[in-house]
């Protein structure tokens, strides 16, 4: 085995002088990591494996690798369990030689007892191969002291020679966890340090939670990920339940051989065991789904239908939706004179968005998942996602609109399990039933204009606990996530351009711009707009701007600018060459030639450009971009350019239609995006008219 010794860069360079060392890892300030057999230093630069010198100022860190005695030799001098870990680590490095860290042991244990209490225990033992993983030395446990008791069963680091460094119980600190200014709840954090953790160490710890006062004795939903970004040698989940307790499970992304557990009845209990071995870590790719969505995963439930959860949730949610006189008075005033149902929804939606501040105050699973009564949220003028969803649904019901608070998991997190009944999700929104349609709105999204709602609610499942139904929230039509930019350009024979600019936005595009214009002061806005204008060409000058409807959510935001760009069209002999403003599509998500995971865009997207300009006096059109049209089930793009008299019109439309593009279609999708990117670099050419 080998141990990496990390030294301060300056001290090491002074020490090595012109000497050469075998097996070196050099990390540069730009993040580049170079593994080499030798390094020499001449006082001003590093020479790695006899190659090109690297300036001293570019070097961040140097790690020297020293040979150690094999674990087989060390094993004779260390306890059996330590020797076994050392042996496993040695073999693991052969399986996964490039890993920064390898999980040697990844064990989960959950036990539900006949009296409704339960025990959770987790053990991990990991071999550290890279400095980035030294954060493993700090561990933490979160707990609610009125319901559960945490315990550090054991925690230690193990050197390659078998030396064990146990944690000091005096290092344990219990404190209120750090929170942002809008989140308040019960719970404490227990943190501690594992000593002498360094590259080459094995970090081995076991945590345990004794849940002596569960919120509901029937609620027992174990889950387990069998992988992450680091590889593992052995991952195991063991669940123990009373023999009369049924356990149902759903397996995702698992081989058939691992989906079914081994089941051991006896002693008044039934034990279920799943395990997997020698799995590589997930190598993350641009725009891939959340890691937890692509790794092998088990979800468990004590229920095979939704009846218990429906009853539990309905008993808590339904009373919270009850209207009061103040609520009825508010709705009456909001919708007075309005007859169209969608306009009623919009008015109430925007009221909750703008008048209920996001503050989360939680003390139990009931308030966490089922919120506070709508009347309290209205009176307090604050609440979190479930509070806002309850209030919004309650106000809609008063207006005669059928609506429900629903649980979701945002599309940047693990999705709600759909195979078995569970409590799940990290967010809550509103589900609206109108004229046979079902659609969704998120009243925590402060600056979205009806019918738009937060992008991270798109392309996910929503659980309606009152109706006990799960429905898929599709991504919206690209017209609802659209950036529409219009340019009216006057072009002089010298290539100077005067531009009237208009940006019309919907969905996330509009939310972002509206939020900025509401937050920023006039000086900040001017600086930002000047920066945008100068991005078209250095020397461009903002002449004026007008932002309309930023405060009125019932109207579309309009962003107007007037600016001039000296020398925007480039002269080349008798030619005048014009770049089409704003037309510059780039798709960093297709940088990889091949992918292992689907593309995950989170939502749909639309972009439009419309340019009208005059043919400069003394010039004629020599070249216009050709007509372009490509489409698939994932996207569509059209572009055209025409001249009528002395007016040129260019317009295009890009629409991405789906959240996901599967790996199987990546090659064709990539080729299509490359065509669009190449087309977006087209120019308009004018030629001087001969006198």
Image (cartoon, rainbow, N blue to C red):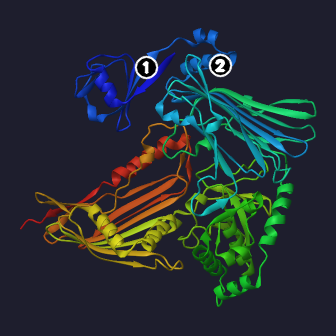
Q: Nearer the viewer, residue 219 or 73?
A: 73
Q: Is residue 246 above or below residue 106?
A: below
- Residue in the picture at 59% in, 73% down: 353
> Is 310 placed left or right of 451 in the picture?
right
- The quarter holding residue 258 reads top right
Q: Secondary structure at mark 2?
A: helix
Q: Is residue 591 left or right of residue 57?
A: right
> Residue 218: x, y in percent?
86, 50
Residue in the foreground of this view, choosing between 430 and 664: 430
Image vertical order of residue 457 relative to residue 545, above or below: above
Q: Residue at x 81, y 71 (%)?
A: 319
Q: Which part of the image, by quadrant, shows the C terminus?
A: bottom left
Q: Residue furthest left?
A: 691
Please tell me how crowded label 2 is: few (under 14), some (14-19), or many (20+) other residues with Cα within 10 Å. many
Q: How many marks?
A: 2
Residue occupying image coordinates x 71% and y 78%: 395
The residue singled out by tag 1 in the image is 65
Residue 121 left/right relative to 344: right
* Residue 649 in view (yes/no): no
Q: Which mark is residue 82?
A: 2
Is residue 151 in view? Answer: yes
User: Residue 150 in the image: x percent, y percent?
Assistant: 73, 42
Please report whichever mark, 1 or 2, sits nearer to the chain's N-terminal start: 1
Q: Which of 421/1 is in front? A: 1
Q: Residue at x 75, y 31 (%)?
A: 274
For the residues labelled 1 and 2, the Cα–Cα distance comes to 22 Å
Local packing at callout 1 (Cα closer than 10 Å; few below 14, some 14-19, many 20+) is many
Left or right relative to 120: residue 82: left
Where residue 490 sits, quadrant-wise, is: bottom left
């Amino acid at each position: 085995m080998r141990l990496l010794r990390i030294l301060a860069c300056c001290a090491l360079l002074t020490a090595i002088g012109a000497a050469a060392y075998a097996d070196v890892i050099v990390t540069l300030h730009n993040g580049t990591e170079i593994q080499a057999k030798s390094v020499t230093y001449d006082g001003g630069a590093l020479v790695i494996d006899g190659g090109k010198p690297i300036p001293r100022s570019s070097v961040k860190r140097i790690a020297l690798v020293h040979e150690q005695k094999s674990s087989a030799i060390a094993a004779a001098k260390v306890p059996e369990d330590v020797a076994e870990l050392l042996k496993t680590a040695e073999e693991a490095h052969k399986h996964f030689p490039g890993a920064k860290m390898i999980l040697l042991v990844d064990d989960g244990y959950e036990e539900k007892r006949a009296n409704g209490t339960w025990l959770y225990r987790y053990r991990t033992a990991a071999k550290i191969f890279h400095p980035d993983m030294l954060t493993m030395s700090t561990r933490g446990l979160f707990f609610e002291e009125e319901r559960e008791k945490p315990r550090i069963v054991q925690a230690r680091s193990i050197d390659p020679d078998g030396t064990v460094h146990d944690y000091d119980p005096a290092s344990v600190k219990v404190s209120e966890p750090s929170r942002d200014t809008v989140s308040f709840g019960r719970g404490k954090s227990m943190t501690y340090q594992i000593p002498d953790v360094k590259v080459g160490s094995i970090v081995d710890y076991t945590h345990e939670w004794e849940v002596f006062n569960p919120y509901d004795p029937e609620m027992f939903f174990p889950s387990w990920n069998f992988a992450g970004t680091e590889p593992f040698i052995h991952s195991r989940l063991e669940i123990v339940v009373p023999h009369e307790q049924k356990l149902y499970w759903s397996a995702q992304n698992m081989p058939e051989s691992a989906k079914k557990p081994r089941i051991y009845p006896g002693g008044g209990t039934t034990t279920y065991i799943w395990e997997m071995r020698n799995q590589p870590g997930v190598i993350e790719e641009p725009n891939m789904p959340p890691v937890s969505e692509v790794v092998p995963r088990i979800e468990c439930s004590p229920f095979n239908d939704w009846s218990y959860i429906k009853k539990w949730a309905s008993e808590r949610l339904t009373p919270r939706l009850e209207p009061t006189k103040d609520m009825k008075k508010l709705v009456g005033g909001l919708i007075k004179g309005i007859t169209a149902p969608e306009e009623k929804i919009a008015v109430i939606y925007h009221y909750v968005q703008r008048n209920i501040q996001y503050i989360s105050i939680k003390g139990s699973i009931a308030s966490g998942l089922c919120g506070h009564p709508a009347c309290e949220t209205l009176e307090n003028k604050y609440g979190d996602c479930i509070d806002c969803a309850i209030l919004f649904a309650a106000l809609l019901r008063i207006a005669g609109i059928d609506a429900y608070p629903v649980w979701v998991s945002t599309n940047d997190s693990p999705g709600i399990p759909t195979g078995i009944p569970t409590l799940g999700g990290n967010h809550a929104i509103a589900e609206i039933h109108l004229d046979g349609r079902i659609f969704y709105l998120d009243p925590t999204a402060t600056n979205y204009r009806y019918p738009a709602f937060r992008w991270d609610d798109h392309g996910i499942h929503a659980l309606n606990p009152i109706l006990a139904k799960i429905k898929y929230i599709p991504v919206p039509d690209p017209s609802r996530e659209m950036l529409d930019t219009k340019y009216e350009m006057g072009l002089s024979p010298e290539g100077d351009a005067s531009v009237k600019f208009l940006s019309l936005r919907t969905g996330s595009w509009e939310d972002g711009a509206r939020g900025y214009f509401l937050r920023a002061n006039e000086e900040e806005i001017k600086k930002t707009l000047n920066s945008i204008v100068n991005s078209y060409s250095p020397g461009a000058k903002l002449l004026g701007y007008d932002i309309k409807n930023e405060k009125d959510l019932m109207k579309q935001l309009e962003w107007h600018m007037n600016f001039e760009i000296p020398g925007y069209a480039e002269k080349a002999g008798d030619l005048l060459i014009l770049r089409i403003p704003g037309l510059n599509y780039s798709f960093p998500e297709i940088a990889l030639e091949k992918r292992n995971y689907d593309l995950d865009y989170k939502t749909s997207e639309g972009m439009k450009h419309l340019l009208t300009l005059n043919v400069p006096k003394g010039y004629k059109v020599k070249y216009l971009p050709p007509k372009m049209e490509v489409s698939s089930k994932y996207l569509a793009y059209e572009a055209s350019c025409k001249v009528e008299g002395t007016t040129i019109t260019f317009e295009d439309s890009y629409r991405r239609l789906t959240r996901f593009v599967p790996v199987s279609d990546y090659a064709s999708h990539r080729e299509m995006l490359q065509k669009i990117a190449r087309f977006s670099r087209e120019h308009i050419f004018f030629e001087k008219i001969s006198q």
